[in-house]
Amino acid sequence: MKYAENVLDLIGNTPLVKLNRVTDGIAATVLAKIEYLNPGGSAKDRIAIRIIDAAERDGLLKPGGTIVEPTSGNTGVGLALVAQQRGYRCVFVLPDKVGEDKRNVLTAYGAEIVVTPTAVPPDHPDSYYSVSDRLAAEIEGAFKPNQYANPNGPLSHYESTGPEIWRDTDGLVTHFVAGVGTGGTISGTGRYLKEISDARVQVIGADPEGSVYSGGTGRPYLVEGVGEDFWPAAYDPSVVDVVIASNDAESFEMTRRLALEEGLLVGGSSGLAVSVALKVAKDLPADAVVVVLLPDGGRGYLGKIFNEKWMRSYGFSDESTESTVRELIS
Ligand code: PMP
């Protein structure tokens, strides 16, 4: 019989798939690493299990303990999944702008959520940061993972994502492209690939235009999960050869093309990463192998990137990827 002992054993070992259509006119091979096939639906499952393993080992998380983190997205899902299987309580602090669907995913896994007002400054006692700090101090046995500074985030990618890419490309990978949020993915995976290849593999960060990694001021953009307005400790700039920006329009167009042409329903940060991977790949020879990491799936964005009205409200309408809805019942 072939089965996993537990859902946590399904984390990692995600496949690579060749991009065939969006790469039209490009000689290099471009391979996408499909992180939505992790059980919680994103690359964040990898950091969640590594962070919790380390906290158990270091005595920071004991039986009956509680995980407290300000997170609304993929990290929350990963932590909730691991916490549930290991018998910990999870309390997530979310700003009120986070939609119902995202809240419901977290509570479906058994997490508790505390909703805080968005319209207050970070140092206000009711802010998302202040409330999570206060809960972490007040709840007995609380552990705060702090994904922006926890070294186990990048380490999880150093130990899993990097070796998987090296193994699955038989060491032929020449370029690695990933979006930068906390910086954990690119720093850990990039460091492994640099070390194992004697620095032959080029590591390229994909950043939304406006974010600090590509020289911006932190001005707002719509792509979620990537870009920052500060430099997190999880990001190690020494392993990144270059950071290339794409804007929201390019990122969303590529996200829609990945669903339409490659059969990959992924999130906006995947579209961003692929648009940057193609900017790099177009100048590379046929023997180059570019691996681009797609962090999550598209189901969390159906009301946004895959919704015509939402896209048009931001001026992103594009006939080539517009969806067709014919109302046959009047
Ligand atoms: N894309 C999405 C959808 C994410 O949630 C994240 C995590 N913030 C990233 C990309 C970036 O990953 P990292 O934090 O490892 O830089």
Image (spheres, rainbow, N blue to C red):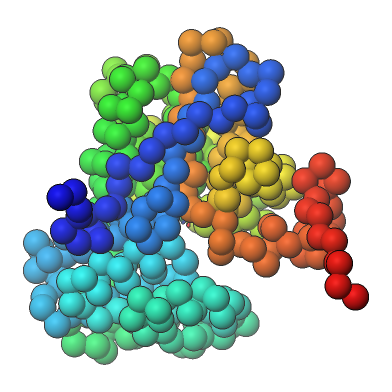
x and y percentages locating residue 30 in the rendered image: 52, 26
Please report the residue visible at 51 percent of the width from the left and 85 percent of the height from the top: 116
x and y percentages locating residue 252 in the rendered image: 69, 49
Residue 132 visible in the displayed image: no
* Residue 78 versus residue 11 in the image, above or below: below
* Residue 200 versus residue 203 in the image, above or below: above
From the viewer's perspective, tell me whether residue 170 is left or right of residue 320. left
From the viewer's perspective, tell me whether residue 18 is left or right of residue 139. right
Please report the residue visible at 27 percent of the width from the left and 53 percent of the height from the top: 10
Count of marks placed on residues: 0
Please report the residue visible at 86 percent of the width from the left and 67 percent of the height from the top: 328
From the viewer's perspective, tell me whether residue 247 is left or right of residue 76. right
Residue situated in front as seen by the camera: 81 or 115: 81
Q: Which quarter of the figure has residue 144?
A: bottom left
* Residue 291 versus residue 75 in the image, above or below: above
Please report the residue visible at 63 percent of the width from the left and 55 percent of the height from the top: 223
x and y percentages locating residue 181 in the rendered image: 48, 52
Residue situated in front as seen by the camera: 253 or 249: 253
Q: Quadrant of the C terminus?
A: bottom right
x and y percentages locating residue 158 in the rendered image: 27, 40
Residue 170 visible in the displayed image: yes
